[in-house]
Amino acid sequence: MSLPGTPIQQEVAISAIKVVVLFGILMSVFSGMTYVERRLLAFMQFRLGPNRTGPFGLLQPVADGIKLFFKEEVTPEGANRWLFVAAPALSVVTAFLAVAVVPYGGTVTIGGRPILLQISDLDVGILFLFAVSSLGVYGIVMAGWAANNKYTLIGGLRSSAQMFSYELALGLSFVTLIMVAGSFRIRDIVDSQAGLFWHWNAVRQLPAFLVFLVASTAEVNRTPFDLPEAETELVAGFHTEYSSMRFALLQMAEYINMITASAVAANLFLGGWHFGLPGVPDSPLWFVGKTLAFLFFFIWLRGTVPRFRYDQLMHFGWKVLVPLATLWIFLAAALIVWRHA
Amino acid sequence: MSLALFHAIIFYVFGGFALGGAIVVVGQRNPTYSAFALIVTLVSLAGVFGLLGSPFIAVLQIVVYAGAIMVLFLFVLMLLAVKREERPERESPVFKLVALALGALLAGEVGAVLVRAERPAVGGFSASATQVAQLLFSPQYLYVFEATSILILAALVGAVALAKKDL
C-alpha cells in the first residue's frame, strides 16, 4: 500500500496532520494539567481539591472552560486596546511555536514512507527553542504595559528581567550537550544518549542538568520563581487586569510552556525515547513518561518550596548559576579534549 | 501548487510585514509602538533569511536582535514611562523641503538599483551552523573574529565599571 498524491502533497498533508494532532494533545494535556495540579497540590497540603464536578472532580476543567467562556471580557479604561488584546495571542503563539522542533520518537513507516516523529527536524533546533522563548517574554511585557496599571507594569518588568537573566544560565547549560553531541539538532542530542541510562546527560552532565532544572523553572515562571505573579505584593502580576478568555489564553500559554520545558528536559537530559536498559526497544511512550515525570516535578516543587525574594533571585541567577554553568563548560571541554587525545 | 509559488508567497508575506513594521517604526509617535513594530520587522527579516536557506542566521537574528536587544530597549522605555512624542510648536518649512528632497533622492536611488538589477540579490545560498563556524574559524576570518570578541569583552568590562561606583 502506498500513499496517494505527489511527494510534495504528501509532505504537506503529513506535516498538517502532525500539527493538528500535536495541537490536540497539547490542549488536552493542558486542561488535564489544570485539574491534576490542583488535586496534587491539595493532597500535598492535606486537602481534597476539586472533587465535586463529575467522578473525582474530573469534569472540573470542562466547568472551568465554560465559566471562563461566558464571563465578561473587561478592558480597563486607559488601557492600550490593541496591545492589550495582542498580548495573550502573542503568548499563546510563541508557546505553541516552540513545540515544532521537539522530537517525540524515531521514525515510523506508513505505506512505505518513513515519517519522522517530529514536526520539523531543524538543523538548529536548540537555538530555535531559545529564539522562541526569548520572543515569549514580549507577551508578558506587552500584557504588563498595555493594561496601564502599576501592578501589571511591575509584574511585566520583573518577569522580563527574570526571564532574560535565567535565559543566560539556560543557554550555558545547553553548551556542553551541544559539545558532546557535536550538533545543534535536538534529535542528534537525544541519539547521543542512546544505550544504558548512565549515558543520559542527566547522569553524565549532572552539573548542567541541575543548572538547567533551576533555570527552566525560572523560565516558565513556576514556584519558587513565580515573582511576576506574586499575589501577596502584586495582586496577580502581569495578568491582573485580564478576565474571561484572554485570561484563559495567558494561563494556557504558561501551561504549554511548562509542557514544552518538560518535553525538552526529557529529550535533552533523560534520553528521550530511549529506555536506558538493555533489551527494551525505543518507543515514544518512554518519552511521554519522562515528560509527565517532569510535569509532576514542577507541581511537587510548587507544593514544597516558598517563593524567592527578588534580590535573592537576581543574586542566585547571576552570581551562582552563571558561574557554575561556565565552570562546567570549561571542565567538560577539557574532558572532551583529554578523551580525544 | 508548486514549490516556487509557495516560496514566493512566503517571501511576500515576510517582506510585507518587514516593510510594514519599518514604516510604523518611523511613521508614528509613540516610542513603545515603534519598539514593538521594530520587533515585527526583525522577526520578518529572520523569516526571509530562513527562506534563503540559512536557518542559523535566521535564528541568530531573533535571539540577538529581536530577543536580547529589543528587550533592553523596551525595558528602558517602560522604566522611563516615555510618553507620546509631541510635535514641535512650529515646524520650519525648510526642514520639510530638505526632508522631501532627500527622500526623493533616496527613492530615486533605490528605484535605479531595482530597475537595473538583473538577478536576485542572493541565490543558491545555504549556511548551516557548521558552515558558518568553519568560515569564522578559517584563517581568513579568525583574527577578525577574535578581535571582535575582545572588543565585546572590553565593552562588557566598561559597562560594569560605569554602572558600579565602588568595585
Image: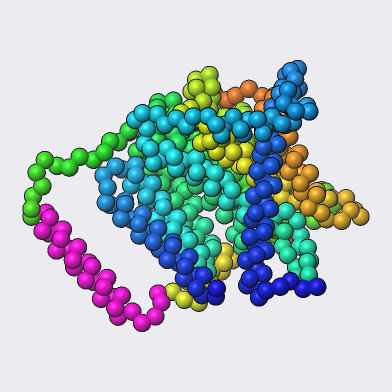
Q: Nearer the viewer, residue A259 or A24?
A: A24
Q: Is residue A45 visible?
A: yes
* Horizontal side of residue A151 vs A100, given as left or right: left
Q: Residue lying furthest right in this view?
A: A279
Q: Residue visible at 19% across and 63% down?
A: B103
Picture layout, residue B113 above or below residue A139? below
Q: Nearer the viewer, residue A125 or A193?
A: A125
Please say whether residue A322 is visible from this viewpoint. Answer: no
Query: Which residue is at a point 89% across and 53% down the rendered structure image?
Result: A280
> Which residue shows up at 63% across the image and 60% down it?
A16
The quadrant the N terminus of chain A occupies is bottom right
The C terminus of chain A, quarter of image: bottom right
Residue A215 coordinates in the image, percent (x, y): 61, 38
Q: Nearer the viewer, residue A254 or A182?
A: A254
Q: How is the image coloured?
A: rainbow
* Residue A181 counted in the magenta span: no
User: Residue A96 or B51: which is nearer the viewer?
Assistant: A96
- From the viewer's perspective, tell me whether residue A192 is left or right of residue B23: right
> Which x, y percent locates residue B158?
38, 43
Q: Image quadrant of residue B122? A: bottom left
Magenta stretch, residue numbers: B95-121
